[in-house]
Image: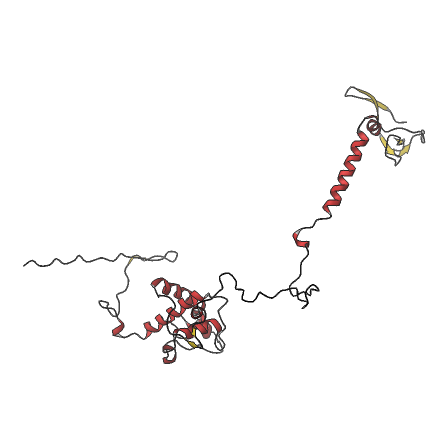
Amino acid sequence: MSRLRQNPCRDSRPRLSGRAQLDGRVGADAFVRPVERSSTGSLVESHKIGVPHVSPVLRDVGNSGGGLHTIFTCTILLAAIALTSACRIDMHVQPRQNPLARSDFYTDRRSARPLVEGAVARGDLRADTYFYTGKIGANPGDFMPFPVTKAVLERGRERFNIFCAPCHSRLGDGNGFVPSRGFSRKPPSYHIPRLQKAPLGYFFDVITNGFGIMPDYASQIPPQDRWDIVAYVRALQLSQNATMADVPVGRQIPSQPPKFAEPGTGATLPILAPEKKSAPEKEETK
């Protein structure tokens, strides 16, 4: 039989020492079967089997005024949380149509609706037709849609070296890296008479729509950068076919090599030496 011991925390109520097995019922009238250890070490039930013993823990709950009410409230609360968490309606489960899906709501059975006639996307009006096509009607134009500055040429050189130089080379002679590795067709040089006489809009149209085995770059190069490349291509043609009449006054041919304040290393760029300005000559007094 289980032995009873006093609670050291000044609690006169008896406590069960040893193991106890509940009868399966929950409540103040639950039965407890005391279990003792035999001389062989196995656990056996007490000879008082069948005698109802009330669990002290359950008896405390039953004796307390709001114990059962608290348990019932917690059970209802947990059930409500479980039910609400399983019924989420987030944006990813909202009513929608998949792309190109069939819809029975419209007469044409298409879920994707056509644009309203005359609608233009924001920033895509393209009122300047020449800027976006390089053509005047059906013929390519031969002028730039904006002034050519040093910044335009520097931007054009940067974009040209990224997108065009692998095939056309940095000089534009068609001896790029890709043709040197067995490309099926070598691109033409920009310095042949046919391309020297080609209008500027022709180069813009080729970059936009491609030509022969050359793919189009409309999705990779925006229109502004395409015109910058066109201006730089014309500068390359001028650099390879310039005459003495094209040399500015006061410039030497060939030009003097640059002078560096610091030559630089493999990790740093060289620094150009500042140009020395000659003092203005004083006019001779009479």
Toward the viewer: 62 or 160? Answer: 62
The outermost residue toward the left is: 286
Residue 159 coordinates in the image, percent (x, y): 42, 65
- Quarter of the figure that contains the C terminus: bottom left
Considering only vertical position in the picture, is 107 above or below 264? Answer: below
Colour pattern:
secondary structure
Considering only vertical position in the picture, is 262 above or below 180? Answer: above
Tell whether 107 sits left or right of 276.
right
Residue at image coords 80%, 29%? 67
Considering only vertical position in the picture, is 159 above or below 25? Answer: below
Toward the viewer: 233 or 40? Answer: 233
Residue 22 coordinates in the image, percent (x, y): 87, 34
Residue 282 position by quadrant: bottom left
Residue at image coords 25%, 74%? 245
Tell whether 253 sits left or right of 13.
left
Residue at image coords 46%, 75%? 179
Residue 87 coordinates in the image, percent (x, y): 73, 48
Mark yes or no: residue 37 visible. no
- Quarter of the figure that contains the N terminus: top right
Mark yes or no: residue 203 visible. yes
Considering only vertical position in the picture, is 268 above or below 181? Answer: above
Tell whether 173 sits left or right of 13.
left
Residue at image coords 43%, 74%? 135
